[in-house]
Image (tube, rainbow, N blue to C red):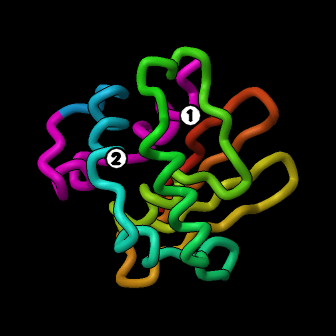
Amino acid sequence: MTCFWDGILAGLRSDDLSLYDLKNKRRETFINFLKNNVSKKHLKNIKWNNEELKDQEINEHIEAINSYNVNGIGSGHLTSICDSFLLLICSMFKLNINHRYLNNMIKYSYNGEKRGILNVSSNRGHFSFNSRN
């Protein structure tokens, strides 16, 4: 069950990956790249549902990313309502992310010049990429 990572990577284009000289879309490589590059600087550039993250929240998201077990991705990713990886991807790739969970829209907004909008959705058991604007 790697649908979270498959959905994210389906939405990222080669010009997104080239921002960091990422050459392939291998899930484990991408996750390790995120883990190696998470920082307060990145997470301060984001609004979640139009709210800036508090310092304690930022610290908790950094801890969640750093402790993520890459070897366990086959068991699925429990996408949270304010997902640490979606926050980081929003910032690093300068994308807004609209995440529809069941009937709720969750918005991750990059504070700066945006490169596009990633539209994703999930339910209790599946995550998918929908479109890219």
Relative vertical location of residue 62 with respect to residue 108 in this rendering, above or below: above
Q: Residue at x 17, y 53 (%)?
A: 20
Image: magenta residue range? 1-23
Q: What amino acid type is highlighted by mark number 2?
A: Leu
Numbered badge on residue 4 = 1
Q: Secondary structure at mark 1?
A: helix
Image spot of residue 66 (x, y percent): 42, 44
Q: Is residue 92 magenta?
A: no
- At horizontal 56% and vertical 34% (from top left) the residue drawn is 4
Taking the image as drawn, is residue 116 in sight?
Answer: no
Quadrant the N terminus occupies: top right
Q: Position of residue 53 (x, y in %)?
A: 59, 76
The disc, 1 or 2, on the residue closer to the chain's N-terminal end is 1
Q: How many marks?
A: 2
Q: Which residue has dot 2 on it?
A: 34
Where residue 118 appears, as percent x and y from the top left, is 51, 57
For the residues labelled 1 and 2, the Cα–Cα distance comes to: 14 Å
Q: Which mark is residue 53?
A: none
The stretch drawn in magenta includes residue 6 = yes
For mark 2, does the 10 Å Cα neighbourhood hold few (<14), some (14 to 19), or many (20 or more) residues?
Answer: some
